[in-house]
Image (spheres, coloured by chain):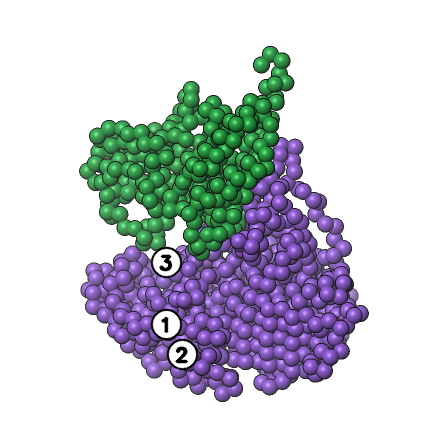
Chain colours: A green, B purple
Amino acid sequence: MDFLRPATWQEALAAKAEHPSAVPIAGGTDVMVEINFDHRRPEYLMDLNRVAELQEWEVGEDTVTLGASVPYSRIMESLRAELPGLALAAHTVASPQIRNRGGVGGNLGTASPAGDAHPALLAGGGEVEAVSVRGTRMIPIDDFYLGVKRNALAPDELIRAVRLKKATGPQQFSKVGTRNAMVIAVCAFGIALHPDTRTVRTGIGSAAPTPIRATTAEEFLTAALEEGGFWDNGKAVPPAVARQFADLVAGAANPIDDVRGTASYRRHALAVMARRTLGWTWEQYRGKQQDERNQPCA
Amino acid sequence: MTAHRTRAATAPGRTPTSLTQGTQDGLTKGGIGESTLRPDGILKVTGEFAYSSDLWHEDMLWGYTLRSTVAHARIASIDTAEALATSGVYAVLTYDDLPTEVKHYGLEIRDTPVLAHGKVRHHGEPVALVAADHPETARRAAAKIRVVYEELPIVTDEASATGPDAVLVHEHRDDHHSGHVPHPNIVHRQPIVRGDAAAAAARADVIVTGDYVFGMQDQAFLGPESGLAVPAEDGGVDLYVATQWLHSDLRQIAPVLGLPEKKVRMTLSGVGGAFGGREDLSMQIHGCLLALRTGKPVKIVYNRFESFFGHVHRHPARLHYEHGATRDGRLTHVKCRIVLDGGAYASASPAVVGNAASLSIGPYVVEDVDIEAVALYTNNPPCGAMRGFGAVQACFAYEAQMDKVAAELGLDPVEFRQINAMEQGTVMPTGQVVDSPAPVAELLRRVKSRPLPPERQWETTEGADVRALPGGLSNTTHGEGVVRGVGYAVGIKNVGFSEGFDDYSTARVRMEVINGEPVATVHTAMAEVGQGGVTVHAQIARSELGVTQVTIQPADTQVGSAGSTSASRQTYMTGGAVKNTCEAVREKVLDIGRRKFGTYHPAWATAELLLEAGKVVTDGGEALADLADVLEGEAVELELEFRHRPTQAFDLRTGQGNGHVQYSFAAHRAVVEVDTELGLVKVVELACAQDVGKALNPLSVVGQIQGGTTQGLGVAVMEEIIVDPVTAKVRNPSFTDYLIPTILDTPTIPVDVLELADEHAPYGLRGIGEAPTLSSTPAVLAAIRQATGLELNRTPVRPEHLTGS
């Protein structure tokens, strides 16, 4: 196994073009496990830790550009307001030591359905900046996950960053594991309210071959909120609507029975998480609406 | 010091060193009853402590074990040519390379092949060994060994193992249990019949039955199996290894190597936990074989994945119980049948059966019992010793039963237990009289009378603190669906090796003057696996010999056996041996004193003399001489064996016999909060009360109780090795999917320590390590049952069991 250590992003791209089989490694939290278990023996391992810009982020007007290697602990600490769903998801990643090493680029590169970042990325919305010596492609997150541990990257491409929509409304992330910390997801759910577009987006983890959105559930809820004028009147979401939303989320999943849980439990848990997180986000949205109404010169 | 060891040409690195300890502040005596700190504690928390995986030797090779990929198969062929031809490979060994006629080992029954012969009986069985100059080379070479398996049908449970056409796991058994078992796939069967359970059942106002399932728990010690074998110039081998009982290993290793025991010199290396999982051999013989074959030091370290195949697990069990009681809350009878899955090899199964049977009804007075325990041979992973050893599985079931009977009678579950609680003088189902304190009702009273932790502790001014809620950091509830439950349990565990086993321990103690100060050196073969023997031995030496400085020598086989660090026995047994030897050393020291100074003071001849604070003193406190003067120019050294009271075998038909040495009792109250919609559990508090006889080191005692409690919690809510019922392959051999409690899963564990002396034991102490592991699990289950109203007859409880999905 050859170990490539590009000093700059340009060198990294050149190396990836020359050796498309090279596996990039940053925090190593997925790659090293696979190597240790002998599940993979890459011909080349490319260490991206010398490429400083991958560790940087930039908060713009409407988006956050998050370097692929920004560790989860930094997301938790510094981007809680801009990316609340991802910050909550980051909090559930493994242990503090791993949160100090791992970043979103690794989750995307591995594209495991169990990656904790995916439901938050899907719900928040954004694009993956895939770069090669040929140029830069912005891949919408919705189009990124192709199959079990397969993503839309070309062999010569590296993930430089993700460009994520700054939160315009409340977001939540919830994950079931059979331990209260440091646990891989049995299933996970992310939700983001987008008051600017009056839409709701969701993400489901560990309950289908890829991370997925529950689009039927989103459409149902978006329509129900619109019809009831809820975005404006700030009323509570009727329990029947929340229930139907939850059922549609469960219906969107395509889970399996495995050593971590049963398919039927996963569906059940997704419905519970969908109902609860909708409640939390909507209550937060209503609270903010009321605060704004109560301010005389708002 | 006397040099006992023939050293290899170059000394290995990171091998154990002596631990010399004074007292922390120079003011306290550091004797028994004080919470002196571990001599290796700072090394361990700073990462400096040398564990067996850190061993190193110049020019050493790395050993690797090829293991079976199927559970049951005939080995049609093994082709090692390509592996042997790999550059960097020094040796490849299979069964055919074993040097003597002894090709099997085992704790009680020698049924385990050193390397598979003709067939494999479980997933992960060792088939071949490779030694190479790099661990990766060894692993890759092993992957080139071509083993052709012809798969055989498997047996995985009682029905398949004892059915009419059952495949025999061992076809030609001739062990000492084979004659009395009802089927060759039953390792051992122990019935216990006392009184007349059928007649007693007729007197019962209520009869409650239940069927229970206990999942396969792993010891999950943090330091994986590892060791270093160094070939010696005399044709022998020096073996540095993490184990629980050096001399038991030695007895099994030497015949396979064809060496006399004195040529296999074993030294205990840093042990990263054991919990029973190091009672059986792992890499010991394999490392020695490779070292002797190559003439080079060989190190073997399992990784976590291999560790799941490298040691036995706790027996999974199916238990059927029938309890009867009268309206006034008195138990009339208990009938039970306990089926333990021993897996492919016997390991400690026979002794686990004896424990499960003899402790099957719990710490209660029941005169009429009909009990049967069996262990099966199956093609599942071998199971053997683990903390609690047969008593754990039974306690889970009988405590569930006690709650059911109490509910049936409309009685408070604690009160019902107290009505039936055993006490000193109670007769066990085996006919053995419990002849030391058995404060079962008092332990229950203590945990019950403790104030309950406040409700809704997750509520803060900034919203819900998810760390205090079920699901924890995963953010699954902010209080929705959360219901509290409280549950109680109490258990009984035997201490020491039972059923007539000649259980002894040896201690060598030396007393001398170094730099003008009297010092003691304690040398035993006790395996320090984290339990704190190295701390307690120094405390005992200080108390008995009046010294401050005590050196604990590394444990090795240059001193007599200390027995196993298991069965809650080491403080009793090796602690007892150290005490015993110290007393004899003291007499010798006093003899020297009398010889040197006897004429100066009449008290030398007339008074009871003690050694205190570096002096010989009378029982009236008068100092007669400095120990430094007494011992000047003379050293005293003795090596003595210590035995507990003899025990008897259980009758194979009736189970009668004084089988146990001592009993140990603990009670728990669990407070849990369950997210009833998601089936997630937060254990809020696990209060424990335990009688320890005498706390030699109170801090260590509390640590043991909290550790045992947590291990019991683990198997209540998460820990389980999942074996595929169709293939008998392990599905979750990793810490990703075999979950053990994190600190966030570990509740507050208030501990109430009773000290009621057992007059038969050294200092009146009671072995403590296992009892808290028993009652913790059923207390948590009882609390979850109360919160959910579900029956929950299996442990561990998984979310889908609580949500019906």
Query: Quick one: label 1 or label 2, which is nearer the N terminus?
Result: 1
- Dot 1 falls on a residue whose secondary structure is loop
Query: Within 10 angstroms of label 1, few (less than 14), some, or many (20 or more) residues?
Result: many
Q: Chain of mark 3?
A: B
| Residue closer to the observer: B176 or B330 | B330
Task: Choose mark 1 or mark 2, whichever is in front.
Answer: 2
- Dot 3 falls on a residue whose secondary structure is loop
The residue carrying mark 1 is B72
Residue in view at x 40 percent, y 40 percent: A212
Query: Quick one: label 3 or label 2, which is nearer the N terminus?
Result: 3
Query: Within 10 angstroms of label 3, few (less than 14), some, or many (20 or more) residues?
Result: some
The residue carrying mark 2 is B167
The residue carrying mark 3 is B56
Circles 3 and 1 on the same subunit: yes
Identity of the residue furthest to the bottom in this view: B179
Apparent side of residue A281 relative to residue A126 in the rendered image (left or right): right
Q: Report the amino acid beneath label 2.
A: Val
Residue in view at x 46 percent, y 79 percent: B163
Residue in view at x 33 percent, y 44 percent: A147
Residue in view at x 31 percent, y 58 percent: B135
Q: Quadrant of residue B471?
A: top right
Q: Report the amino acid beneath label 1.
A: His
